[in-house]
Amino acid sequence: MRRRIHPVAATGGVVVAGFGALYLAGLLLTGDEIPEDTSVRGVDIGGLSQSEARRKLDERLGTSATGPLTVKIGDRTDTVDPRPAGLAFDAGATADRAVRGGSDPITVIGGLFGAGGGAVEPVVRLDEDKTRTALEKLAEKHEREVRDGAISFVSGEPKPVLPRDGQTLNVDASVGVLHSAYLAAEPTPANLPIREKAPRIGAAETERAMNEFARPAMSGPVTLTTGGKRITITPAVLGEHLKMRPDADGRLVPELDGKALTEDPAVAAPLAAATGEAVEAELRLDGNRVEAVTAGEPGREVTADSVTEAVLPLLTKDGAAARTGEVATKLTQPKVTRENLDELGLKEKMSSFTVDFEPAEYRTKNIGRAVELINGSVVMPDETWSFNRTVGERTKENGFVDGTIILNDQYAKAAGGGVSAVATTVFNAVFFAGVKPVEYGAHSFYIERYPEGREATVAWGSLDLRFTNDSGNAIYILAESTDSSVTITFLGTKKYDKVEAVQGPRTNVKEPGTRPGKSEECQPQTPLEGFDVTVERVFHSNGEEVKREPFHTRYTPRDKVTCD
């Protein structure tokens, strides 16, 4: 039985067949020719073959396709090189798209009746990995940290630090934006998306802090009173130790470093004069027993907290009278008094050593000054004593004069020359007291007036003489000098019955050379061999040797220096 075909179905089949025929006819008639009135970014390629269109597009759009692409990142402008960024214009694929609309049936059929053409979007190839790499470099380059508003104090003047938004390039969102902007119809900068972060301390809070605190704080000096004395602190000194920091509520509040202010030379000296440190009892030996010459006196000191508490309220006041206030002090007791000698174990001579030297005005002056600063030092159990910290820098301001020192293996002139005689004497007092040396160093070449391997020198900022009091009791240092000698005595409680030195022979002996000295301020120098030597510190208790401790010293040859 023959099936009948519905008329509508028959008509639909004819339409499909006709559409296909028209499409095939369009393909055969147009071939690879670009429809009339076809353009790519304003370049007319209508009527050209695919290969001709590709060449023309390369010539006309190729240069702009490889040129730098301008981008904006927040308020900054930069450029991106397309090729390294994974962006490329595909002229061939664009020409193929233009031919028959890239084989789009409607466009192909339209070409049979004179229709088609129009603007064709360029084909852009994107290597996303390269694009991300380029954007990450841009992000790093243009990363801007958020900056809170702040206030600094410079030479007694308040300086506001303006707040600033932070910005970070959004790399993920920028990939598509950069792709779209490449070969865009309008060559405008591509606005790459960013993430912004607002400062916690804004301009309004910064201005408030300037008006309410910073400007009044620097409007004039403040004056502290104690013990009938007045200590004036200038804005410049105050500003060195004053800051404004944000609190938990995001407000700028003042912060004064009372410790640093108290230790500032401009404040420390007048404070010390107005208060006064505790005075240690003065001790001496009566035979081999220790006795107190004076009782010791309490002192008063100003603490960092008391300075902070006194100064801060004055900073927002107006006028000299309102900016004056009293600073609290606290009573301090001396470490050593007549009453606590037994308690501290200060009962006998632990050791004593004397170094003789050739009289010279500079030696007498410098050695006497160092002795003055060391005498009466109290070293409590387990404390470490420092020569440099106790004596201070050897400067004219500290009471020292120019003298002969050893510099670069030859004699030279400098402030504090001769102080090594005191260092050597202290070292030997440490040695024979049996306490622990922590830092020490011998002269570079041997000096005949000192014991071999048992001498020390010091240099400010590079070499100190330090020992730790491991005797179990306090140590009191007696220091005295004459025009030709210096003596250091340790008072305390002996840890050992006896400590002695056993010196070994000189080894690794090296002969000195001869060299001319510098023409200016030449210091002549006699020759002396260099050598190594070991000295053992031998400890005795209950009549028996309990241990030995070696001290190794290497001396370089002392060359003969002529000043002819």
Image: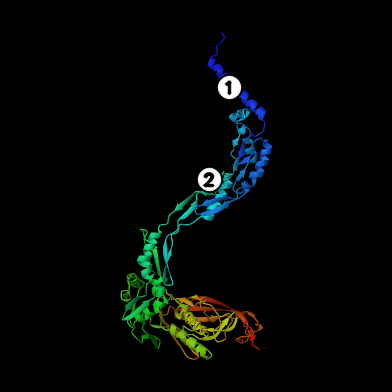
State the image coordinates of residue 207 (x, y, percent, origin top left): 38, 63
CA neighbours of label 2 inside 10 A, class few (<14), some (14 to 19), many (20+): some
Q: Nearer the viewer, mark 2 or mark 1?
A: 1
Decide which of tag 2 and tag 1 comes sooner along the chain: 1
State the image coordinates of residue 336 (x, y, percent, origin top left): 36, 80
State the image coordinates of residue 54 (x, y, percent, origin top left): 66, 39
Q: CA distance from mark 2 to mark 1?
A: 42 Å
Question: Is there CB contact under 8 Å for labels 2 and 1?
Answer: no
Q: Quick check: 520 left or right of 148?
A: right
Amino acid of disc 1: Val
| Nearer to me, 386 or 256 | 256
Mark 1 lies on residue: 16
Amino acid of disc 2: Val
Q: Which mark is residue 177?
A: 2
Q: Quick check: 419 left or right of 336?
A: right
Under circle 1, the secondary element is helix
Image quarter of residue 20: top right
State the image coordinates of residue 233 (x, y, percent, origin top left): 38, 76
| Nearer to me, 86 or 407 | 86
